[in-house]
Amino acid sequence: MEQADVFQWLERSALATYVRHSHLLYPVIETVHILGFVCLAGSALLFDFRLLGISRKIPVTDLARHLLPWARRSLLLVVPSGVVLFMTQATSLSHNSVFWVKLLLIALAFVNAEYFHRVTLKTVDHWNHMRATPGAAKVSGILSILLWTGVLTCGRFLAYLG
């Protein structure tokens, strides 16, 4: 099966057809997607602000322990709703460069987060509370803010460019 056939198959599936033709279901799924993204990006943004030196009174580990579960749970909303939204327009989105940029930015945001957690965060004992954040953590925070802002921007542009 060729790639174009897969996108057509997804778009013609019973689920995609049902959602696309429902007057309420598509906007409800879109709202769930947006709320999930708000939780994901909001958690990341608050954590990134801490990495940039804001709210140094809050230990990084405490903030991570509070925010990261929210970010992870939000994926339970974002991923399935995003897949269903994609299915309803799979053929046209597969030809939309903004959509592919959005997916690339999401992948880069996850790579950035993974690197931060596996490498940079291992030194947190030295800068956890009331200390200057190391450059690597600041770079990770800036990248995160830029990448998630890019994802949000691409998501909005999908409605207008395509």
Image (spheres, rainbow, N blue to C red):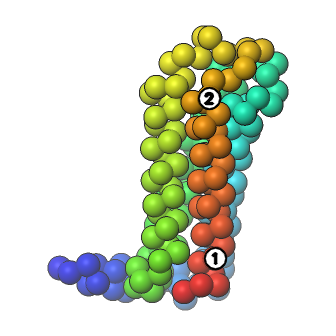
Q: Is residue 103 above or below residue 40?
A: below
Q: Which mark is residue 116?
A: none
Sooner in the amino-acid sequence: mark 2 or mark 1: 2
**Image point 47% across, 63% down: which residue?**
103
Position of residue 68 in the picture relative to residue 83 (left or right) = right
Counting from the top left corner in percent of width and height, residue 123 is at 54, 16
Secondary element at tag 2:
helix
Which residue has dot 2 on it?
135
Question: Would you say residue 157 is visible in this rendering?
Answer: yes
Q: Position of residue 98 (x, y in %)?
A: 52, 75
Name the image quarter holding the C terminus: bottom right
Q: Which residue was labeled with disc 1?
A: 157
- Alpha-carbon span between mark 2 and mark 1: 32 Å
Does 7 sit above or below residue 145?
below
Q: Nearer the viewer, residue 10 or 59?
A: 59
Front in this rendered view, residue 59 or 89? 59
Residue depicted at x 50% and y 29%: 117
In the displayed orientation, state which residue is furthest to the top: 125
Left or right: 107 in relation to 12? right
Which residue is at a point 40% across and 79% down the rendered structure image?
94
Q: Position of residue 24 (x, y in %)?
A: 66, 80
Q: Tag 1: Cα neighbours inside 10 Å, few (<14), some, or many (≥20)?
A: some
